[in-house]
Amino acid sequence: MADSDQHRRATFADRLADLVEARESQIVLGLDPDPMRLWPDALALVPADGSPVQRAAAAVRAHCAALIDAAGPACVAVKPQLACFERLGADGWAALAATVAHARERGLLVLADAKRGDISVSAAAYAQALVGSTPTPFGEVEGLGADAFTANPLLGVDALTPLVDGARAAGAGVFVLVRTSNPGAADIEDLVLAGDGDGDGDGDGGTVWERLARIVAQLGGSPGRSGLTDIGAVVGATAPEHVARMRELMPHAPFLLPGIGAQGGRVEDIAPAFAPGRAGGLVSASRSIATAHESTGAPPAAAARAEAERLRAAAWSW
Amino acid sequence: MADSDQHRRATFADRLADLVEARESQIVLGLDPDPMRLWPDALALVPADGSPVQRAAAAVRAHCAALIDAAGPACVAVKPQLACFERLGADGWAALAATVAHARERGLLVLADAKRGDISVSAAAYAQALVGSTPTPFGEVEGLGADAFTANPLLGVDALTPLVDGARAAGAGVFVLVRTSNPGAADIEDLVLAGDGDGDGDGDGGTVWERLARIVAQLGGSPGRSGLTDIGAVVGATAPEHVARMRELMPHAPFLLPGIGAQGGRVEDIAPAFAPGRAGGLVSASRSIATAHESTGAPPAAAARAEAERLRAAAWSW
């Protein structure tokens, strides 16, 4: 896999920082294809033969390619939502792999939005699936080939470690959920911990998400030449009041900031994320780009391109 | 899908309870296929042609079928670990679907060990993928067809709700991670919360996992005729001191208890789980069954059958 080796020469953090500068964009294009809301041009490309699932997967693949072609030039990465592909089974997974390849051909990084978390060998298997490869008696089997993936930290450090190790071995990154963009983040992530009163920063109260942030900083270690670590954080842009505190606890972690656009977050609220450099704050938008035509009346591709460029310019102006 | 309709007539909890009684087993056979540790007979069945990933997926499929045929008669369900299939991409997902079908043909329930968690439409898409179906312009696409799946609750109630709603609409269940079997469970799940001192049980301290347990009980609602709810909990059997407290907080939730065997848990430590009936405590074992031959020297199938039967009898004796 010479292309893969070439692609993976630098660490994830350094590749990310370089590409943000080269493309002058911090925008991550979310790919959440709903088979009932695909662009009409994509549906028109689907062959008339084939089973429903084959045709639906072909339509999803065509839609994602068109969306990447339209909005990709204003973006630094794509973020496929794995659930949207998995619901089409093996055909959906093949469409996902094709979408990853298409994004890479267009010079974009791929952040697999998987939110995986499991223990020991199962966690290691997820890393193999998303960014690594799997030894088999028939030869090595390449995984999805993403540049990074999102992970769920509920199961603790020993469950994150195989994900982090697997990512680093592949020159890839991990974005750990720290505080998500939904109201339900209050149920667990925002809970206040009892303090042990010894002031060592380990048992001194704070919230669950602050504890998660410390874990991310610990796993991230020292930054590379970009000033960033390979272990980042998912930080909902719908709670901008937390972004400065997040940056304090994770000074070198790249932040993946969903919730801009459709979920109500604003680029101007998240400026503290950009402290270690522009690549420190990646602005993720999905529906606001893919469905921009529904409010503007322009053709889907033109509307998506305009909305992505609007977001790019707004973020880059900070 | 007449077979599927037939299969789904009762709620998950009632089907589970009936099948535990009919098969006199609480044992859940974990399917965690590692391509480098498959049974030799399964490897021998793989055709000589095909790409490495096609051959590896065929071998995984044959291995899982052989393991189900050997150990399944002593079990009530299988629990495929999705990571182990995803690492073989679309071919792996096809092997997973074939394994689900094979388990169902053998009269077993299927608990998809996915540990999924996401927000709003993404969570709904995971439910479609695992237990439901997806509307498309080309017709409805059936998902994996599992009877239940595991879910990660870090993102809170509004993220669990689409999973629960999707499961219930399909007559399926959800097992929510409450306290896992790994040492790292101490990092987040065991954290002690600050109390609000009002004694209403909502902000009265306790641990993160106790809070998660309350959420599971709340989502589960009232039990059906079996005395169990469709929303269960994953409770590591490596911390037996917690099982009684779990049962107190979740009186009607079926518990999925991994960690027996290879991870050091013992059936006799988890008796409190069985309080609402035998189906209240499902004992999951993976490697201890699949690799039993490595310590006994017996043929793999015979060793797996003997170990599954040993576990079945041990659990049923309580």
Image: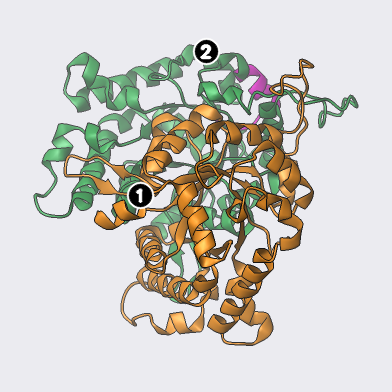
Chain colours: A orange, B green
Name which residue lies at 25% across and 42% down. B60
**Within the magenta stretch, is there residue A299?**
no
Q: Nearer the viewer, residue B6 or B286?
A: B286
Q: Which residue is mark 1?
A: A9
- Magenta-tinted stretch: B243-255
Residue found farthest to the bottom? A298
Within the image, what quadrant is residue B120 found in? Answer: bottom right
- Specify the amino acid type for callout 2: Asp
Q: Is residue B45 visible?
A: yes
Residue nearer the viewer, A180 or A59 = A180
Q: Position of residue B258 (x, y in %)?
A: 47, 26
Nearest the viewer among B28 and B23 is B28
The spot of residue B214 in percent (x, y) is 71, 32
Mark 2: secondary structure: helix
Secondary element at tag 1 = loop
Residue B226 appears in the rendering: no
- Classify the position of the N terminus of chain A by image quarter: bottom left
Residue B269 numbered tag: 2
Subunit ID for the residue under disc 2: B
For this orientation, the residue located farthest to the right is B198
Up the image or down, B120 lies above or below A47; here it is above
Q: Is residue B94 left or right of residue A237?
A: left
Same subunit under labels 1 and 2?
Answer: no
Measured in 3D between alpha carbons, the distance from the residue under mark 1 to the one under mark 2, in whole angstroms, is 50 Å
x then y, percent, for residue A252: 60, 41
Label 1 sits on what residue type?
A: Arg
Q: Is residue B12 above or below residue A42?
A: above
**Vertical position of residue B156 compared to residue A274: above or below:** above
The residue most toward the front is A225
